[in-house]
Amino acid sequence: MWERLLKWDRDTFIYLNGLGIEQYDVFWSTVTQFTTWIPLFLLFIALFFLKFPKREALYRFLTVLGLAVFIALITHITKISVARLRPNNTEEINTLIRILKTPTDYSFFSGHASSSFSITMLVFLFLRQRVKWAILFFIWPLLFAMSRIYVGVHFPIDILVGMVVGLLSGWLFYAFYERFIALGSRSVHP
């Protein structure tokens, strides 16, 4: 069973990565960079301070930062513990695939997927009642995670697990905020 799953993962990766077209390489190489998304992060911060009182906005922002640290730690620990090679470092397939990036750390699970989906989930939950189009925030993690297959550095399972971990972590931090922080941030007037 496990071998069949890994074979499906490898074969699906090779197929999806092979769909890449050279004319889109610059697009996907740009999409996969964290720095490309800085304007979106600034939008998130601006929306917090536009839609909530200052103290509440600050607490929400700090909760997002706490989540970012948490997800980075859990992703790093998992990568070291599992020690799965990235596709670009896997000798049996790296001559069959398109490689646009060459990281040397481990693959499971995708930090791009876990971080982007966790932050987006938390920001969405914070803003969904105040920003009608907040669901559009999920375009970012979808593109960001898909780019990892295109540039040759993550298998589909790495991305799917990273996505699930991210969504659950975002929801967990939202529940934590509502349970322990929200009342205090709303009851104190600046």
Image: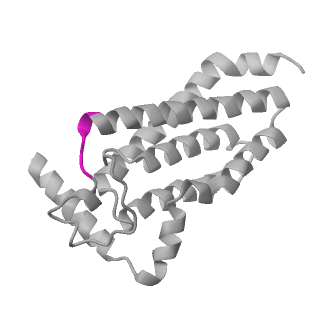
Q: Quick check: 94 above or below 123?
A: below
Of residue 151 and residue 125, the one placed in the foreground of this image is: 151
Q: Which residues are drawn in magenta?
A: 81-85
Q: Is residue 133 visible?
A: no
Of residue 160 and residue 152, the one placed in the foreground of this image is: 152
Of residue 150 and residue 8, the one placed in the foreground of this image is: 150
Q: How is the model colour-coded?
A: one colour
Q: Is residue 158 visible?
A: yes
Of residue 148 and residue 35, the one placed in the foreground of this image is: 35
x and y, in percent, of residue 181 in the image: 67, 19
x and y, in percent, of residue 155 in the image: 29, 56
User: Residue 178's quadrant in the figure?
Assistant: top right
User: Residue 74's quadrant in the figure?
Assistant: top left
x and y, in percent, of residue 100 in the image: 39, 69
Q: Quick check: 3 above or below 23?
A: above
Q: Main secondary structure of the magenta part?
A: loop
- State yes or no: residue 68 in magenta: no
Q: Quick check: 26 above or below 127?
A: below
x and y, in percent, of residue 71 in the image: 47, 35
Seen at 47% across and 83% down, the residue is 23
Seen at 78% across and 46% down, the residue is 46
Seen at 57% across and 22% down, the residue is 176
Seen at 30% across and 75% down, the residue is 18
